Amino acid sequence: MSDASAPPPDDRVARHGDRTEADLADPEYRKGAIALLAALAYGELVSFFTIVQEATFAPRSQDKEALARVATVEFGHYEGLSARLRELGADPHEAMEPFTRPIDDWHGRARPSNWLEALMKVYAGNSIAVDFYREIAALVDPQTRALVVHVLSDGEQVEFARSQLQAAIAADEKVAGRLALWGRRLVGEALSQAQRVAAENDDLTNMLVDDGSGHGLDLAELVRLFARITDRHTRRMEALGLSA
């Protein structure tokens, strides 16, 4: 679950009060950082299995091999996040539990029925989640941020999907309309899932929303956050010659 095309979050950090490793001594902030890492960890774990499952749609053995490599990277990300959760004194599985339903629900609602839909799910759907976590990474301490950015910075999966989709559209323009419709459905589901993850977990919400401490975002900034995510989705679709 990564997208190298999205900008790093660091240019926005200073506006929301710089966090440091010392903030991890604050129990409330620590719980928020753990929640972020846990949500991302479960996303990576599920991504491993969905990549393997959706590789069954791949028409060529080369495509299956490429996706197998991507799945291996995703599981490596999961292991790194789990190790960091343990360093912070959290049991990874207990920490991930609050996020299992919204993430599983998203994958259930966005289940592709063919190879091109599977590629679009990676390119458009998963990239929404990547953008969301990148935005939140601007609000955490440098060590946590570095791990989150590392997990999200490997864009091999998205680049693979992009190249395959571009080739398919060039070969048969009739698929463009179907892919545009599927992409619009995916972005709606993905944005709803991101909002649900943020809203339904108090620890994540408390870290995301400014309580007057100077850390976090106010309502207007939250609106702009999701507007930026939507704008990036529009640019990704335009790169394929599709309307968002």
Image (cartoon, grey):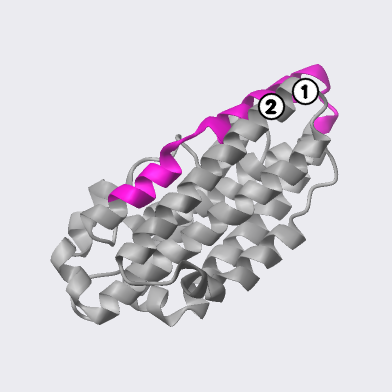
Mark 1 vs 2: CB contact within 8 A: yes
Residue 205's spot in the image, x, y percent? Answer: 40, 76
Residue type, mark 2 in image: Glu
Q: Is residue 158 magenta?
A: yes
Residue pictured at 37% horizontal, 51% vertical: 148
Q: Residues within 10 Å of mark 2 (few under 14, many from 20)?
A: few
Residue 244's spot in the image, x, y percent? Answer: 65, 44
Start-end of magenta stretch: 146-175
Q: Is residue 159 left or right of residue 198?
A: right
Residue type, mark 1 in image: Ser
| Circle on res. 130 | none
Residue 233's spot in the image, x, y percent? Answer: 56, 45
Residue located beneath label 1 in the image = 61
Front-lying residue, 184 or 32: 32
Q: Is residue 185 left or right of residue 178?
A: left
Front-lying residue, 145 or 162: 145
Examine the rendered structure and indicate whether residue 156 appears above or below residue 83.
above
Examine the rendered structure and indicate whether residue 105 appears above or below residue 13.
below
Residue pictured at 65% horizontal, 34% vertical: 68
Residue located beneath label 2 in the image = 65
Front-lying residue, 227 or 81: 81
Q: Residues within 10 Å of mark 1 (few under 14, many from 20)?
A: few
Question: Label 2's element?
Answer: helix
Quarter occupied by residue 225? bottom left
Question: Label 1's element?
Answer: helix
Question: Does residue 240 show up?
Answer: no
